[in-house]
Image (cartoon, helix red, strand yellow):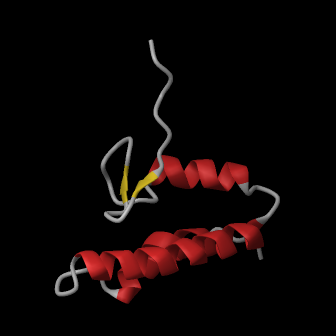
Amino acid sequence: MSPPRPHLPLRPLWLCRACGTPWPCAPARLALLREYAHGRVALLVYLGGLLHDAAGELHRFNPHDGPEPQQLFARFLGWAVSRCPS
């Protein structure tokens, strides 16, 4: 039996390599929260960089029908910001 595949992005489509859903998928988000459990600012900086990359790549891939900026923010950063401790 092979080990489970990690939930990593397939670029430039930004789909999960393991489950095929938009990345970061739920398992990827959980893994990121575990990995950055003691560094929430680092997680947000990392996700912000990925958001920047994804916005450019998705626009180049499909300039007329890509995700809206609000959708990309919610997908890459919104979930992590809402879980930040006060």
- Name the quadrant containing residue 38: bottom right
Q: From the viewer's perspective, is 72 left or right of 50? A: left
Residue 70: x %, y % from top left: 39, 86
Query: Which residue of the protein is positioned furthest toward the right in this rendering?
Result: 38
Compared with 27, 62 (above or below) is: below
**Quick one: quadrant of the C terminus?**
bottom right
Compared with 27, 75 (above or below) is: below
Query: Which residue of the protein is positioned furthest toward the top in this rendering?
Result: 1
Number of disc labels: 0
Query: Which residue of the protein is positioned furthest toward the left in this rendering?
Result: 64
In front here: 27 or 56?
56
> Which residue: 53% across, 71% down?
50
**Quick one: quadrant of the N terminus?**
top left
> Which residue: 54% across, 55% down?
29
Residue 52: x %, y % from top left: 50, 81
> Which residue: 32% across, 53% down?
21
Residue 40: x %, y % from top left: 75, 67
Q: From the viewer's perspective, is 30 left or right of 40? A: left
Residue 85: x %, y % from top left: 75, 70
Q: From the viewer's perspective, is 36 left or right of 78? A: right
Q: Taking the image as drawn, is residue 67 in sight?
A: no
> Which residue: 51% across, 51% down?
28
Compared with 47, 33 (above or below) is: above
Q: Taking the image as drawn, is residue 55 in sight?
A: yes
